[in-house]
Image (cartoon, helix red, strand yellow):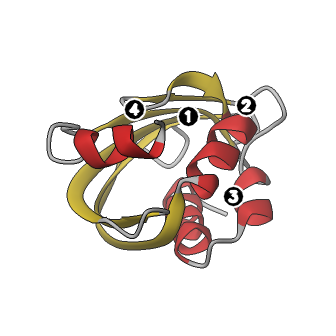
Amino acid sequence: MSASDLCKASLDALNRSDFQAVQAMFPANGTVVSPLYGEQNAHDFYAHLFADTSRSDTTLMNVFATSEDSRSVARQFKYNWTLSSGKLVSFEVVDVFELTEDRKQFQKLTIIYDTAPLREGFEKLKT
């Protein structure tokens, strides 16, 4: 699977709420750096994300890769995130991935987006 295909497949799994499929895209020691959740083990991050999510609807906009043999890839997408409280927040996201050496999984994900429009609704989930 190419890096671009891996990016698309992980969004598809997120849209389907397929926790196991998303987890399988990261090794056990994979990490995620998130503006809302901080830096966590990838499997723990997705457990928290899925617990806080009622529905995910994403629209892929772009995938950026310097070359097919690069271990870095980024994607830009529109995220319509329905929190477990029922509140819908929509925003654009850029995900920057470091792939595993064999390029079959994501080793690290750094998520980039403006948290201002959704922080209040997210903080209410945590209180």
Judging by the rendered image, the residue that carries numbered circle 3 is 22
- Quarter of the rendering occupied by the N terminus: bottom right
| Label 4–label 2 contact, CB within 8 A | no
Q: Position of residue 80 (x, y in %)?
A: 31, 69
The image shows residue 56 at horizontal and vertical percentages of 45, 70
- Asked if marks 1 and 2 touch (Cβ < 8 Å), the reply is yes
Q: Which mark sits nearer the N-terminus, 4 or 2?
A: 4
Q: Residue at x 60, y 79 (%)?
A: 16
Hey, what amino acid is under mark 4?
A: Leu
Q: Secondary structure at mark 4?
A: loop
Q: Nearer the viewer, mark 3 or mark 1?
A: 3
Is 82 placed left or right of 43 in the picture? left
C-alpha span from label 4 to label 3: 19 Å
Query: CB under 8 Å between callouts 4 and 3?
Result: no
As measured in the structure, the alpha-carbon distance from the residue carrying label 2 to the one carrying label 3 is 19 Å
User: Measuring 21% from the left and 55% from the top, which residue is drawn there?
Assistant: 92
Residue 34 in view: yes
Toward the top, the furthest residue is: 39
Secondary element type, mark 2:
loop
Pinpoint residue 23: horizontal percent, then vertical percent. 75, 51
Report the residue marked by disc 2: 101
Residue at 57 percent across and 49 percent down: it is 49
Which residue is denoted by mark 4 in the rendering? 36
